Image (spheres, rainbow, N blue to C red):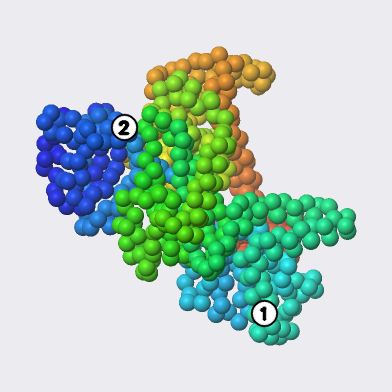
Amino acid sequence: MQNLKEKIASLPDEPGVYQYYDKNGKLLYIGKAKSLKKRVKSYFRFNPFTPAPNLSPRIFKMISETADLNYIRVQTENDALILENSLIKQLKPKYNILLRDDKTYPYIYIDHSELFPRPRITRKVIKGRSIKYYGPFPSAARDILDSIYELFPLVQKDSCIKGKKACLFYQMKRCLAPCEGKIDQTTYKKILDEAISYIHDKKKLLKRLRERMLQLSDQLRFEEAAQIRDRIERIESIQTISEIDIAKIENLDIFAITSSTNEAAIVRMFMREGKVIASSSNKIRYDEQKGFDIEEAYKRALLEFYTHETPLTSSKILVAHDFDDRIKLQEHLSQKFGKKIEILHPKRGEKKRLVELALLNAQELLKTKTKEDLLPKLQELLGLQSPPFRIEVFDNSHLQGSVPVGAMVVYDQGKFDKKSYRHYHLSHKDEYHQMKEMLTRRCESFGKNPPPDMWLIDGGETLRQLALDILQSFGVSIDVVAIAKEKIDAKVHRAKGQAKDIIYCERGKIELLPSDKRLHFLQKLRDEAHRFAITFHKKERQKRAKEIELLKIKGIGEAKVTKLLNYFGSFDAIKKASLEELSQVVSKSDAKLIKNAYN
């Protein structure tokens, strides 16, 4: 502790980021400071050297565990804010709040500089002065866009205008053929303006969709009617509180966070032109012993949501609670987007009513409990740092070293998060180096996709130690567990539920009874990763077989195969292409060779 005391005494009176470590060198907390000396000193009392008495129970516990610190100096407090957020995402300190919902939401946008503009979807800023954004839409953006194109005869595809000839959409009465001059820009604009009003007003859109669903049902087109029904449900899912209007035509983003014993809920509402057009919500699970810092949660939520790639459609952000860094964050976002942005904590009027409504929805979300009784039991059995609410599971697949691939599946708060699944093309032939390559690439992506609570590796203690070494090299401390199949691996034996798979963790080797639900849970995770890896491997082998089949044709080399793939998109499309279509990419003689070989 004397070493820690000396380090604190020598801290500079400059902006920076500080990191606290426990006696085992594990990262506890990352914070930023306008003055490193003043901020870090505020956590301690020096005679005797103990945690300061005025700290919250959560911070007091953290400082009690602190045995060492490091710091990074920066030029400004704004730089410290950016660095702090980046490091927290990548290193997952024990006492920092880490949000999981850091994806960019889709927007619908229209480029009004085009002669006949059409709505499209984006998750990033599109360059251009005449771009108008609508959203964000946490989900159902594609459903809204598809509905607009079905209800209004707009230009359906980017290629339509370029073709300069009326296509199938014109025959289906889904387009008015501006490519042939059958509609002028003024008339087209009126149709587009009405379509935009349906993007703003989901009630109008849903009414039209219900009418369309009934119409299809009356025509006995039940499959199409069912598709419209499912689309209606998805659009309604972002309309939880869309009936709320305010008199002023205003654009507002509203954030509300509330917490209970071991979980918190965050609700985001997006108001455009006086109407709430969409909302999203998610839960944040945390270890009760570590506590929850609501001020840090607001800061994390805003920094994760407003990135450089985000199209900014509102310059006013409302928060349900005030927090220390609110003004500093406001200055940071204003500087980032080059326009004045306000983060407001309203205390009266319509805006206060809006944040109260968002807070009420967050409280309701906490009442919907998810059954995850196994996770605390798993934490106790395996000696984990915290209940593993989010788990990443890794497996690889190959056939005698050929076509090696890896797979990562993700289990998050009671279900598999299939949107977060990832495939990996690997270069090594043996399983050890394949796993090393895959885990290293996953660590390299922690900046964009933060680490989970636990890794589960399909393998034994050797691969578990490999995973720990890789994590340590990146400065990340998360739990790693491995599960290895029992020597007896007969399918009948496993099908009867008699598999005594072996678990490896920090506490050593653990063997559970085949009937143990904790073992079943880990097996379920491992089996899903195995299924995902095998499926991808089979697909890649089939693709490779088709590639070899094409390369066997005399005179068709890799360069021509690549050219054909870039044009047709797949080997099946090349096989089905006509002689004339092939001749557009390769010479007529090569096209004949390909057709003859396939025939």
Dot 2 falls on a residue whose secondary structure is helix
Answer above or below: position of 58 versus 151. Answer: above
Image quadrant of residue 96?
A: top left
| Comes first in the chain, label 2 or label 1 | 2
| Residue depicted at x 50% and y 27% | 375
From the image, tell me which residue sits under label 2.
Answer: 57
| Mark 1 residue element | helix
Check the image and name the residue furthest to the front. 348
Q: Locate residue 399 relative to residue 571 in the image: left or right.
A: left
The spot of residue 501 in percent (x, y) is 54, 19
Comparing 489 with 64, the one in front is: 64
Residue at mark 2 to residue at mark 1: CA–CA distance: 61 Å
Q: Is residue 346 above or below residue 10?
A: below
Indicate which label's residue lies in the foreground, 2 or 1: 2
Q: Residue at x 66, y 71 (%)?
A: 195
Question: Which residue position holds label 1?
Answer: 190
Residue type indicated by callout 1: Lys
Residue 325 place in picture, x, y as percent: 31, 52
Image quarter of residue 277: bottom right
Residue in the image at 48% along x and 53% along y: 355
Q: In the depicted view, which residue is nearer to us: 542 or 436?
A: 436
Q: Quadrant of the C terminus?
A: bottom right
Residue 111 x/y as whole percent: 55, 74
Residue type of the residue flagged with mark 2: Pro
